[in-house]
Image (cartoon, rainbow, N blue to C red):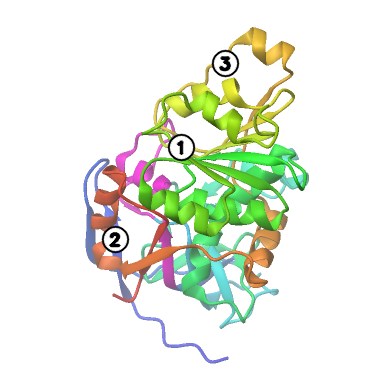
Amino acid sequence: MSVPEIPKEQWAQVVETVGGPVVYKKIPVPTPGPDEVLINIKYSGVCHTDLHAKNGDWPLEVKMPLVGGHEGAGLVVSKGELVTDIQLGDKVGIKWLNGSCMNCSFCRQTEEPLCPSASLSGYTVDGSFQQYAIGKAAHVARIPAECDLESIAPILCAGLTVYKGLKESGARPGEEVAIVGAGGGLGTMAIQYAKAMGLRTIAIDGGEEKEKVTLELGASKYIDFTKTKNLVQDVQKASADGLGPKAVLLLAVSEKPFQQASEYVRSRGTIVCVGLPAGAFLKAPVFDTVVRMITIKGSYVGNRQDTVEAIEFFRRGLIKAPYKVVGLSELQSVYDLMVEHKIAGRYVVDVSR
């Protein structure tokens, strides 16, 4: 497949100072190293993590100046001499995990996201909010030729992350999972992955728009935390036998839901922490945690095999991420909506405009 000529410069959204706005400007097109590929990004999802990167409010040093983004889908236009299993013109994706050493004890056991020298797209290395981005060939997502690049972009982080979290929950087909933050970009996909995996879902979020979205996607029940007088009681009542859900998937962007989950999860249930509210802490009563045998765990991003599986659900038509498309030049307005908690579903930027 022929590929277009690679320009010297490209349009990108650049965070020039921590906490500052993104600046739409021209920057040089990077050159891939021996084990890397250069991807002409067509679309990129916008994740709440991108806002954390821009604001630098995580306890992790962020690259500055920075091109954010880690849900980039596009075509390979150049590759290093060591890359033999990817061809020019192939559809691939930039994920949060840009690269890892492939040799430490974590990488050898397929736990690459835990690699101490991992590089992170749109955080420690430049990401997908640019027309041409670099990815390590071993880690870029392989996108089937029949998949649409616009609609698959959110799968590369949001889809992969919630799929991994649901696997970590240990919930079996027929069991119930409460999804906190169900109406957001991750939650809307978590509902669909849960359904595809044979799980029933209790959606927890705020507002009528999110109620409509979550129920249409297949949630069994919806609980509006802004209206309920007793959230713990309502979640338990929403479960089939009134004893609470088998697992809780915490996708919230504030701390309080992380403190509540242990009160309504089923005995011998599992709480999976995925969302990363800045400066937040976990808190659970020791007595209940012990005598009810509750498991509390974190779930990060998926490994390469998880990526293949998450994409396969999408390829089969089981996952349809609700999203809105805007031009890359409008990225700051998406961040503003995030700050105001006014996003239902996900935004995808068209990198060509």
Looking at marks 2 and 1 on the same chain, the residue that comes earlier in the sequence is marked by 2
Say which of 238 and 117 sits in front: 238
Give the vertical position of 4 relative to 111 (above or below): below
What percent of the width, then of the height, locates residue 26?
A: 25, 68
Answer with the quarter of the image where residue 290 lies. top right
Q: Position of residue 215 (x, y in %)?
A: 51, 53
Magenta highlight range: 42-68
Whether 304 is drawn above or below 224: the answer is below
Position in image of residue 4 (x %, y %): 44, 88
Q: Is residue 106 left or right of residue 352?
A: right
Residue type, mark 2 in image: Gln
Q: CA distance from mark 2 to mark 1?
A: 26 Å
Q: In this picture, is 290 found above or below 129?
A: above
Q: Tell me how far mark 3 sits from mark 1, CA to CA.
A: 17 Å
Q: Residues within 10 Å of mark 1 (few under 14, many from 20)?
A: many
Image quarter in which the C terminus is found: bottom left
Quickly name the residue at label 1.
252
Q: Residue 284 has which mark?
A: 3
Q: Which element type, helix, strand or loop, lies under badge 2? A: strand
Q: Residue at x 63, y 43 (%)?
A: 165
In the rendered image, residue 332 lying in the magenta stretch gets the answer no
